[in-house]
Image (cartoon, rainbow, N blue to C red):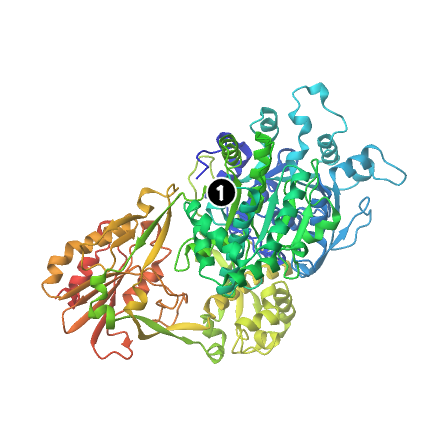
Amino acid sequence: MAKTQKGSARNKPFPTLEKARNSINSLFFDNDKHDFAYLKDNLKHKLRRYQESALLYLYWSQIQDNADEQYNQLLFNMATGSGKTDVMAAAILYLYHEQGFKNFIFISNTTAVVDKTQENFFNSSSSKYLYSSPIIIDGERISFNYVNSTFPVNPEENTIYIKLTTIQTLSNELNDPGENGLTYDDLAKFKIAILADEAHHFNVDTKKSNKKAKEENSWESVLDHIRGLNSANRQLEFTATIDVDKPEVYEKYKNKVIYKYDLDQFMNEGYSKKVFRLQANTDNNQKLLNAVLLNEYRKRIAKKLGIPNFKPVMLVKSNRIKTSQQVEQDFLEMINNLSSADLESFILRNQKLNAKSRALSKAYEYWLSQDLSQAVAEIQQDFNLRTTINVNEGGTKGILSDSNDFKNLNSLEDENNPFRIIFAVAKLTEGWDVLNLYDIVRISEAKESITMNTTNAEAQLIGRGARYYPFVYQGRKSYTRRFDTGRDATFENQLLETLYYHTINDSKYIDNLNKSFDKMDLIVNKDGEYDTYTATVKPSFMRTNFYKQGNLYYNKTEKVPDANYASIGDYGINNLTIDVDYNQSTTESNLHDKYYDNVVRESDVRYDVVADFSNPSDYRLIERALARNKFYRFSTMKKYLPMVKSIREFITSDDWLGNLKVQAKVPNEYNQILSPFEKLHILDNALKIIQKNIVKNYQKERGTNQFIPIAVKDVVKYYQKVIPKLSNKTISEVIKPKPMSKANWFPYDWAIADQLETSLINRIESWLDELKQTHKNIYLIRNEETISTWSLHEFENNEVKHYEGYMPDFILVLDDGDIMYQVYMEPKGDQLLERDEWKQELLESIRPENIEIIGETKDVRLYGVKFYTTGDGRGIYDELKKKEIFH
């Protein structure tokens, strides 16, 4: 990895951020009290964990008594590609709904970002639109109105007004107002929230060491002036780049940073593509053809996996317009004249030269196995004048500054967008949201300018290009990498989640580039910084009858018929009464008292009936509560309640909620009658409880106790694991190869395992002498999930909680000549025991008396045992001794 150290910003204290974090993590802060349900219901994208945290930190700041003075200007420092605009979209609804803001000013320093944001907030037919349509809060439909000049004095109900403008335009309007133009006096009439995107551009004055040189009408002072017009005004700033290494900038923002989510954390948590660097001294055409082969290889992989509309895009980056134009011309000529013989010669010539590049080696190997005439035809179809876009602009403009290119470049993921390759001089524009960029080619130029400014711009380009592309695989769209681990974690598949930066090989340039990566916490790997471990099935094992004719076993699943969901009881909701705690009391204690759990005794509470579903007079209240929750729209309900014919039936039928009562558990000291608003709030919570149970318990497949065979030779197969040479994992998590060539009981020549898995292998080895006394054949099968149909499912109880498939890491096979025992085993770290408890329960339900093995004449007995923990802490040895397995 190029990145070996943290940016210095990590070491600087941010008091507001720490105060917020400590308060939110304290026992006194109820994280569940504010779950932002209305935000989640009205946003197009599901909020990620860190985005929810950012909103929770904002919420904390705004409920403080001194929010107007201390928390009226806040900064969200979040990584490129982490969805700052989603947080901004959610913040608008939060400020509107809970803080009473109706008027918003969105600003950026470029027209491109403003245009993109207009699509995000106003164009509901755009793929970039950020909200659900329509927006419903508390049963009311909310509208967004675009503001050209100033805000209306008499605003419409349920309406949010947004003025979108560049900071240049806003500054000109306010500092040199024309007739009927916008003035500070106009803005002083309103309570306004400023949303400042790419906020690092608004610190020019702060960065000036000479205070006298600061301009009265600078962008920074304009924003300060607007914010100061009303004590209730707010300014929320968003940027991935905050230069706190400069003392003046740090002093300005140290108490304004409310949330930080750094790029390396973003990448480590799987929200981005992985990034690799390919560096070479080859000429530009060779570099470009390598990128094309890699790019087209990805397209073929996606097609093989059944991924629809997968179109990987390339960007060719130059420093000079003249160079870029020439390279484009040369590239198109090369592709147009390419023949299958040329391509074969190129691959064979470069195969040995680029052997250190795993990506190119795999690509070459693949293409040499294909029909190269067909390959050339596809390349020429995908890379030609029609699929090329040229945005070669000079100066400091971004590649979206030309409005003619805006639509094409901001819709590259769309199926009907033809472009596959972009030639550009300017850097990727802030705000460019392309996700399917997979190769960036850095052109070599005669007079290279290798400065930190150059490499900083390139590092930012790579960071933006590393945004994850959420393609659909097996019918599901994911927003995090899915091929890092598991049965599908092949190198070939991982190419669909990897960006390659094809760059020049110059020592000074690489040194500066690495410093730029470190500065922005960008994790970039050098292609080849991985160890590849191979486990091969031993010939001796392949000669055994167990390998040739033997089977392993997994249980069948069955479809759950809709008729099984004929009443609310089928969803695990058997109680005719739902009690909702409505203890709103506040307790008082001394400042240094320990946390006191304010538990109310049953004798001190009363139960008020909020809604009786059998009472017609409560129907309107129930209907209104249902309307506030998008789940209870009939089109959504039918997905989970296939037997329900109408919402009225759901409310009134005895099979559904017709006999339900919702009660509030209220302290006796609360001597008021519950208001209609309070009843509605309580009913909301009850309906959420019902919704949760319905969704959790409605499944289309479940496991059975019938186990079916799968051939050993279909499971025990050659496999590889690719392990980073440098890793942020703990020593116990690091995967290493253990030689097993002399262990005839282990099918593979190597065990590629982490420390805990190796511990289990060693533990079983220590049992061998005892096991050999009663068993002729002993094998420990390492399950690498080489085929996708091989998994176990819960089956024993009627209240199944987990329907996903699961296959433990090891199967111990013991054959005494008459009976074959197969024992499912799983090593598990202590930190995962609680989360994966259901898997242990599944394993322990596998007993001969609980299951039926289909189509098996030989006497086979299946068992599962408790998780193996360090040092056999859960005693699986004793568990096996108690069974007949050890005799």
| Amino acid type, residue under disc 1 in the picture | Arg
Nearest the camera: 321 or 863? 321
Position in image of residue 744 (x %, y %): 18, 59
Seen as rendered, the residue at the extreme left is: 773
Seen in the picture, residue 853 relative to 874 is either above or below; the reply is below
Q: Residue at x 53, y 54 (%)?
A: 342
Judging by the rendered image, the residue that carries numbered circle 1 is 277
Seen as rendered, the residue at the extreme right is: 179
Instruction: Pick the quarter of the image with the N terminus.
Output: top left
- Whether residue 603 can be seen here: no
Instruction: Pick the quarter of the image with the C terminus.
Output: bottom left
Label 1 SS: strand
Position in image of residue 692 (x %, y %): 50, 64
Nearest the camera: 114 or 887? 114
Nearest the camera: 740 or 18? 740
Position in image of residue 318 (x %, y %): 62, 40
Q: Residue at x 29, y 78 (%)?
A: 854
Seen in the picture, residue 247 relative to 607 is either above or below; the reply is above
- Whether residue 215 can be seen here: yes
Seen in the picture, residue 185 relative to 735 is either above or below; the reply is above
Position in image of residue 365 (x %, y %): 43, 56
